[in-house]
């Protein structure tokens, strides 16, 4: 009985998730910004993962399907979840207009690889205690690096709705992925610690529901204020050796706008924005947006 109730909750979650996909598509269609299109692709990717989880639950729990299908869908599910550990820092990088560093890239790739490997080993051979525990330790170390980096980057996101959405998605994902792995391991045990697949499926549905709810709130706020005129904050000191266009871009960066948003506001291409940003960084002897803001506020010498 509960399996069918949980499946109903899942169907409701699918509806909410695809509502977010539709809002994301409309948001992109309004101004055809590449960044908005990438966001739409990411949300559509999450929706596909949700559908895949439903297929796996229906086949494994309700139909008692064969091992081959269970392993195949499980592999695809683990691969999809692993990629979230890349998309999270990549999304933050895009929002605040920064590049990957060696540490960020290494932590993301390590977390993705270890998470998928643990899932694949579990599906094919079961839980190998010594290897899995060592790999789990490496995974949590990489996950900690990702989490600390995102938390430290949050103050650079100037728009309140974007900042809250990133925090919610980060918290949900960082909490959800380890629980998925632990839930699978406990699902094979007997006793008070055993976790049924139905309970794990319910938790997965609730994860997507809260993700979708955060997305709906975000898009409704963004679309209702997208037509507002952005008033530049004139905080570039007059003595800085910048051209007029470079000043506009420096001010926009200080407001937390992405390269794509700056390009939209100024009517230029994102590549042109990147070239101007490189010139600004070179003239002011800075290497990041944090250092740039420090110069603009007079807290740092150039």
Image (cartoon, rainbow, N blue to C red):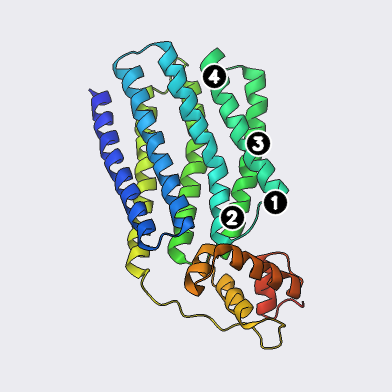
Q: Which residue is mark 4?
A: 122
Helix, strand, or loop for circle 1? loop
Q: Earlier in the sequence, mark 3 or mark 2?
A: 2
Q: Which residue is mark 2?
A: 93
Q: Earlier in the sequence, mark 1 or mark 2?
A: 2
Residue 15: which numbered mark, if any? none
Q: Earlier in the sequence, mark 1 or mark 3?
A: 1
Task: Please identify, in this view, whether the residue under mark 2 or under mark 4 is nearer the observer.
Answer: 2
Direction top: furthest residue: 66
Helix, strand, or loop for circle 4? helix
Query: Is 70 placed left or right of 91 in the picture?
Result: left
Q: CA distance from mark 1 to mark 3?
A: 14 Å
What x and y, as percent, mark residue 200?
39, 28
Task: Please identify, in this view, whether the residue under mark 1 or under mark 4 is nearer the observer.
Answer: 1
Which quadrant of the figure has residue 259?
bottom right
Task: Please identify, in this view, whether the residue under mark 3 or under mark 2 is nearer the observer.
Answer: 2
Name which residue lies at 66% across and 51% down. 100
Q: CA distance from mark 2 to mark 4?
A: 32 Å
Q: Which residue is mark 3?
A: 110
Helix, strand, or loop for circle 3? helix
Mark 1 crowdedness (10 Å alpha carbons): few <14, some 14-19, many ≥20: few
Which quadrant of the figure has residue 237?
bottom right
Quadrant where the C terminus is found in the figure: bottom right
Q: Earlier in the sequence, mark 1 or mark 4?
A: 1
Name which residue lies at 54% across and 65% down. 269
Quadrant where the N terminus is found in the figure: top left
Q: Earlier in the sequence, mark 2 or mark 4?
A: 2
Name which residue lies at 47% across and 66% down. 159
Q: CA distance from mark 1 to mark 4?
A: 32 Å
Q: Is residue 59 above or below residue 282?
A: above
């Amino acid at each position: 009985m509960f399996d069918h109730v949980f499946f109903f909750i899942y169907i409701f979650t699918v509806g909410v998730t695809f509502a977010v996909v539709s809002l994301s598509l409309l948001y992109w269609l309004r101004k055809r910004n590449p960044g908005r299109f990438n966001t739409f692709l990411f949300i559509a990717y999450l929706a596909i993962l949700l559908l895949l989880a439903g297929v796996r639950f229906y086949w494994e729990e309700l139909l008692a399907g064969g091992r081959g299908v269970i392993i195949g869908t499980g592999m695809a599910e683990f691969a999809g979840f692993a990629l979230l550990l890349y998309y999270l820092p990549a999304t933050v990088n895009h929002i605040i207009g920064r590049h990957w560093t060696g540490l960020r890239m290494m932590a993301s790739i390590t977390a993705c690889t270890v998470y998928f490997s643990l899932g694949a080993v579990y599906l094919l051979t079961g839980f190998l205690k010594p290897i899995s525990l060592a790999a789990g330790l490496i995974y949590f170390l990489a996950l900690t690096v990702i989490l600390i980096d995102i938390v430290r980057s949050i103050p650079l996101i100037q728009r309140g709705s974007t900042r809250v959405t990133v925090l919610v998605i980060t918290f949900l994902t960082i909490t959800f992925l380890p629980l998925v792995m632990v839930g699978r391991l406990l699902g094979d045990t007997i006793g008070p610690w055993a976790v049924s697949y139905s309970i794990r499926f319910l938790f997965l549905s609730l994860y997507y529901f809260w993700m979708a709810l955060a997305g709906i709130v975000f898009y409704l706020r963004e679309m209702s204020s997208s037509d507002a005129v952005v008033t530049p904050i004139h905080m570039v000191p007059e003595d800085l050796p910048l051209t007029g266009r470079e000043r506009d871009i420096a001010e926009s960066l200080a407001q937390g706008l992405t390269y794509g948003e700056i390009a939209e506001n100024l009517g230029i291409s994102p590549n042109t924005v990147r070239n101007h940003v490189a010139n600004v960084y070179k003239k002011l002897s800075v290497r990041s947006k944090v250092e740039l803001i420090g110069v603009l506020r007079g807290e740092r010498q150039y």
